[in-house]
Amino acid sequence: MPSPVREKHHRLPPESYRGNVVVAFTVNTSNHFPYFNHPEAATTAMSALAESFPEHYGHVGVYVFMPQHVHLIISGKDTRSDLLALIKDFKQKTTFRLRQAGGEFGWQKDFYDHIVRANEDYGAQVRYLLRNPVRRGLCERWQDWPYKGVLGQTWEQLAAAIATL
């Protein structure tokens, strides 16, 4: 008799996402469908992210919604922070709201994440994230892409933070 299929666990332990930690996430839509080509969907998702961020004690963050996925780099504020719970809450709110509005929407079950270590170039990672729409040919300058934002800070504070690193 064949053995049952066992799903590989590739997520770090939940405590890895808690506290004063910086994590880069990439969350794909179900079947890579370009839901965020529609401004209403992108606006709804950005609103859900902005709500989930303080609820789970996010400190600062930057994000870019692409047609088929979202890139985020977020940090935890203190010992109460739980970035894994933040992402799960954001995904749940987005799905609920977009389906409630009459649309079909879904996220892939899993997502990619990377714990940003102290010796890594945070500024380079933020610049890479923000330039995604340019690399994909969606706009000529990252500043022109409408589906981006900062959390817990202003654009000026982000610029100062990555310029001094």
Image (cartoon, rainbow, N blue to C red):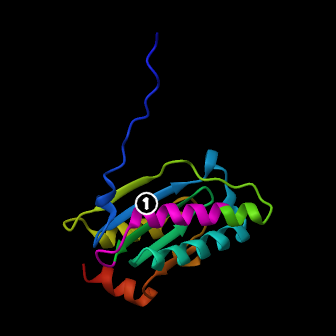
* Residue 5 in sight here: yes
Q: Which residue is mark 1?
A: 25
Quadrant containing the C terminus is bottom left
Answer whether residue 24 is magenta in the image: no
For residue 12, above or below residue 80: above
Task: Please state the horizontal and vertical placement of residue 155, each as a whole percent of the image.
Answer: 45, 86
> Residue sitting at 50 percent across and 60 percent down?
88
> Residue sitting at 38 percent across and 84 percent down?
159
What is the quadrant of residue 126 in the picture?
Answer: bottom left
Lateral position of residue 108 relative to residue 151, left or right: right
Q: Secondary structure at mark 1?
A: strand
* Residue 134 in sight here: no
In the image, what residue type sits under mark 1?
Phe
What is the quadrant of residue 97 in the picture?
Answer: bottom right
Task: Please state the horizontal and vertical placement of residue 14, each as a whole percent of the image.
Answer: 34, 56
Answer whether residue 80 is magenta in the image: yes
Task: Please state the horizontal and vertical placement of residue 117, each as a whole percent of the image.
Answer: 23, 64
Lateral position of residue 151 relative to residue 47, left or right: left
User: Between residues 148 and 24, which one lies in front from this camera angle?
Assistant: 24
Magenta region, main secondary structure: helix
> Residue sitting at 38 percent across and 83 percent down?
158
The outermost residue toward the top is: 1
The outermost residue toward the right is: 102
For residue 22, above or below residue 111: below
> Residue sitting at 65 percent across and 53 percent down?
106
- Magenta highlight range: 77-95
Disc 1 crowd rating (10 Å Cα; few below 14, some 14-19, many 20+) is many
Lateral position of residue 27 relative to residue 80, left or right: right
What is the quadrant of residue 66 in the picture?
Answer: bottom right
Task: Please state the horizontal and vertical placement of residue 47, each as a whole percent of the image.
Answer: 61, 76
The outermost residue toward the left is: 119
